Amino acid sequence: MPAAENRSLSASEARLLLDYFSDFPVLLIASSGGSDSTALLWLMARWRNTKKKGGPKLIAVTIDHALRPESKREAQAVARLARKLGVEHRTLRWTGKKPKTGIQEAARLARYRLLSEAARKTGANCVLTAHTLDDQAETVLFRLARGSGIGGLAGMAHASPVPIEDPGGILLVRPLLGIPKSRLLATLKAAKVPYADDPTNRDPRFARPRLRELMPLLAREGLSVDRLALLAWRARRAEFTLHQVVSHAATVLSPGPWTAGEPVKIEARAFFELPDEIGLRLLGRAIDTAGDEGPVELGKLEALCEALFKARHSARFRRTLAGAAITLARGMLAVERAPARSSRAPKRP
């Protein structure tokens, strides 16, 4: 590993990363007690203390998922560190029945829900998380293994809405996304700040730890953390360009406001002349606008587009997907809200 990746973050480097937040009145810091979030908490406190006007109010929030006996003790350790750093701290507990399958995803959604609620209560409009360059690389690899398109390979953005059904305008901000994990470990070592070690990060029952084990082997073949993060950056650049092109196509082929829940009509001949990727995305955007079941899955959207293209000379074509009805008739492609599904099975005669 290059020596530069083993250096602790200097105060001047931290300022470059964190000065964007100088005028925020309140900042919520997600802090689990692990190495990365502990480093973020320590860096934020050091940065805040250099501000002549005091800087934003910092509130560290630890989510106790109550999945391991050590979690309560780890939350208490974060509270002690926060108190030492002069940062307000709160522990929120994930209560209720836990699912038997998909526990990591359920815990992730519960964590973001609790963080969003805490942000609203404290007047913060963003939650800072300690995602690193290594996390970005793992995300790209994880999505690549699951067949994601360009949007998925773009990885995590530096800022994005909280991934829950009603984020309430709260943003997740990842100020350390371009920083290798090794530099955060070096920062904690230099500052003699302890942190917790979560064994689930190495549990082979879960996909991310298994991918994490592969990273050194992949790096020896050239597929390093830096290369995977570079792929994410290039995919994000392409994703932005495609988004702009699709917006232009929507304006030309279906002028007028695209209002959630309202039908979208597109001139069919012009639609079928679009490049495949643009047509695919335009149809997906129309389904997301008119439908009521959330973002459409890429594989299902691709299958729909293929069937639609094969039926382009048919008198009529109709399918439903993601709460939207897609109809091709009389030279128009119409996408509208699908009829509500009956909750009762039909009675036998």
Image (tube, grey):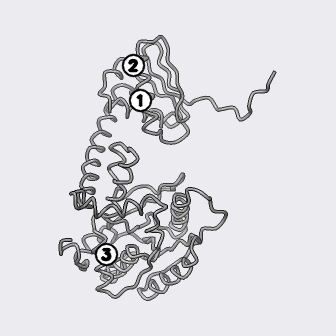
How busy is the neighbourhood of tag 1: few (under 14 within 10 Å), some, or many (20 plus)? few
Expressed as whole percent of the image width and height from the top left, the position of residue 34 reads: 43, 75
* Residue 94 at x, y percent in the picture: 60, 68
On-image quarter of the N terminus: bottom left
Q: Quadrant of residue 196?
A: bottom left
Tell me the mark number nearer the camera, choosing from 3 and 2. 3
Mark 2 and mark 1 in contact? Answer it, CB < 8 Å.
Answer: no
224 to 241, vertically: above or below: below
Specify which label sits upstream in the sequence, 2 or 1. Answer: 1
Image quadrant holding the C terminus, namely: top right
Look at label 1 and name its amino acid. Gly
- Determine the secondary structure under disc 3: helix
Labelled pair 1, 3 in contact (Cβ < 8 Å): no
CA gap, disc 1 and disc 3 = 49 Å
Comparing marks 2 and 1, which lies closer to the viewer? 2
Residue 249 rendering spot, x and y as whole percentages: 32, 30
In this figure, which residue is indicated by the disc labeled 3? 184
Q: Badge 2 is on which residue? A: 268
Under mark 2, the amino acid is Ala
Residue 180 higher or lower than 73, as above or below: above
Q: Write the residue at 33% across / 82% down.
A: 188
Q: Residue at x 44, y 23 (%)?
A: 307
Q: Nearer the viewer, residue 84 or 189?
A: 189
Of mark 3 and mark 2, the one earlier in the sequence is 3
Q: Amino acid at mark 3?
A: Leu
3D distance between C-alphas at marks 3 and 2: 54 Å
Q: Residue 69, how many percent across, how many down?
A: 58, 77
